[in-house]
């Protein structure tokens, strides 16, 4: 399975959000890269929890920025963010032992994040650019 490669096409134009997206991508990439060497369920659970904690922190920061500037798609973003966290936690609950880092989970994390940045977050690029936020 391929890792996610960050490039300008994933840039949402807001430096801090790009930085947070890159960090989140890095955390997911680490899970993808080390999926075969990570055998200790406790370590895997710890890395997944770190990732979901950071995702939550990022979503809060992003939603705060959207609320501050009256971004019209805030509710739909909140809904997507919550759905991602629910689904990820569901995967983590359902997975036990060596299957905790399932291919399905890694594929979900990778495709959700890139899809979300490219389709939903990209919609705020122009909005924040017009507000002078970079
Ligand atoms: Fe985001």
Image: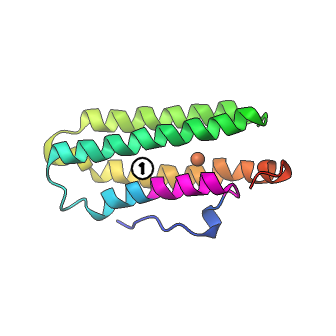
Residue span colored magenta? 12-25
Residue 113 point in image, percent of width and height: 51, 51
Residue 61 point in image, percent of width and height: 59, 39
**Magenta stretch, main secondary structure class:** helix
Q: Nearer the viewer, residue 131 or 100?
A: 131
Q: In screen coordinates, is 90 left or right of 123?
A: left
Task: Check residue 56 for magenta coloring.
Answer: no
Label 1 near ligand 1 (CB < 8 Å): no
Rendering quarter of residue 76: top right
Residue name at image x 50 percent, y 33 percent: 83
Q: In screen coordinates, is 61 left or right of 87?
A: right
Rendering quarter of residue 86: top left
Is 49 rendered above or below residue 106? Answer: above
Residue name at image x 25 percent, y 42 percent: 45
Label 1: element kind = helix
Tell me the quarter of the image containing the N terminus: bottom left
Is 110 rendered above or below residue 94? Answer: below
Q: Residues within 10 Å of mark 1 (few under 14, many from 20)?
A: many
Residue name at image x 44 percent, y 43 percent: 54
Tell me the quarter of the image containing the C terminus: bottom right
Residue 106 point in image, percent of width and height: 35, 53
Would you name the residue on which mark 1 appears? 109
Residue name at image x 44 percent, y 35 percent: 85
């Amino acid at each position: 399975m391929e890792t996610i490669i960050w490039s300008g096409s994933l840039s949402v134009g807001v430096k801090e959000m790009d930085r947070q997206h890159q960090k989140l991508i890095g955390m997911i990439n680490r899970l993808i890269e080390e999926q075969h060497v990570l055998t200790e369920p406790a370590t895997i659970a710890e890395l997944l929890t770190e990732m979901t904690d950071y995702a939550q922190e990022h979503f809060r920061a992003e939603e705060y920025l959207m609320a501050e500037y009256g971004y019209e798609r805030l509710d739909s973003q909140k809904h997507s963010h919550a759905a991602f966290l629910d689904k990820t936690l569901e995967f983590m609950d359902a997975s036990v032992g060596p299957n905790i880092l399932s291919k399905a989970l890694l594929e979900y994390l990778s495709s959700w994040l890139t899809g979300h940045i490219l389709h939903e977050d990209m919609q705020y690029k122009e909005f924040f650019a017009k507000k002078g936020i970079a």
